[in-house]
Image (spheres, rainbow, N blue to C red):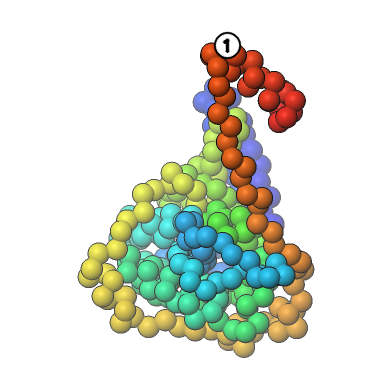
Amino acid sequence: MPVFSSRSTKDSGVRKIVNNHACNGSFIVSAGVGNQGGIMNIVVCLKQVFSTEAKIRLAPVGKSVIEDQVEWIVNPYDEFAIEEALKIREAKGGGSITAITIGPDRCATILRSAMALGVDKALHLKDPLFESLDALGTAHVLAAAIKKLSADIILFGKQGVGMDQGMVQAMVAEILDLPLANIVTKVTIDGNTARCLREVDDGAEVVDCALPVVISTQKGLNEPRMANLKGIMAAKKKPIDVWTTEDLGLDAAFLGSPTLVHEKYELPPPRTAGKILQGTPEEAARELVALLRNDARVI
């Protein structure tokens, strides 16, 4: 994994982090990633998730979530990644953007959505072995695809709202031996260097990374655009490439042995009815304090 050194500037509240792994701006040839001297290749990794307004239902034994009659959408944090890819291409005056997702046939819809916004190409990683991947397995599949695409910038949303793990981008960076700028709110590409701003507890960090680089996006980075009718119609005609385990050269036995297995899902307990306090404001205040101390035990 890349090694970072830091220099703290307390007066400004900004801490600067320099990526020593490739601080001279050179490509990491050993990783086999990065476009050696051509147009900039940007990869955006997408995840399809339940709508944030969907009502979640569990199968009888709690082993899985019932997917029937559920609306599927692009992971909201991934929308910032798509928008940032488009902004980088516009700022550079060119480049190629490829959207990638893993999953069954229904996942093609989010690739079409990305192309409707202006993404150039779409890659669907689809194989029966991919249907039960954990985070590490997902990272290995994505890393294999990214390596074949020779990406310069790899963008993720900071986490998927389905599982809220936020681990895959770091695992991909580790597998490919690339620098990682995680949960960023500003990205500037200058030559072969990406300067990323991260919010931290005591201020902000400025992270300088040589390309190729993995970046995960946070709310506040940009304002995702809406697709227009022309883009939607054009996206319907664009091809979607499909790659399987064989295309990626992955070991089927390895992918079939997840390191994390979910034994059971449980819904949160239903909310109890609220209580209206009667009496004068003084009486209600005393009763509220008593409830918080004796029943809720929060004071």
Judging depth in this view, the residue of 181 and 40 nearest the camera is: 181
Question: Label 1: few (<14), some or many (≥20) within 10 Å?
Answer: few
Q: Taking 226 as reference, is 121 above or below it?
A: below
Taking the spot 32% from the left edge, 56% from the top edge, the residue there is 225
Q: Quarter of the image containing the C terminus?
A: top right
Q: Does 37 sit above or below residue 298? A: below
* Residue at far front of view: 279
Q: Is residue 148 left or right of residue 60?
A: left
Q: Secondary structure at mark 1?
A: helix
Who is closer to the viewer here, 91 or 140? 140
The residue shown at (67%, 65%) is: 135
In the orientation shown, which residue stands out farthest toward the left?
230
Which residue has dot 1 on it? 282
Q: Position of residue 268 (x, y in %)?
A: 65, 52
Q: Position of residue 226 (x, y in %)?
A: 30, 59
| Residue 152: % across, % down | 49, 64
Count of numbered circles on the image: 1
Inspect the image, locate mark 1, and give the three-letter code of the amino acid beneath it.
Glu
Q: Residue drawn at (59%, 65%), measured in percent from left and top?
A: 57
Q: Is residue 127 above or below residue 59?
A: below
Residue 143 visible in this rendered orientation of the protein: no
Query: Of all residues shown, which one is farthest toward the top?
Result: 282
Quarter holding the N terminus is bottom right
Q: Nearer the viewer, residue 119 or 231?
A: 231
From the top left corner, tell me how far across and down residue 170 is, in percent: 64, 57
Place residue 74 in its image quadrant.
bottom left
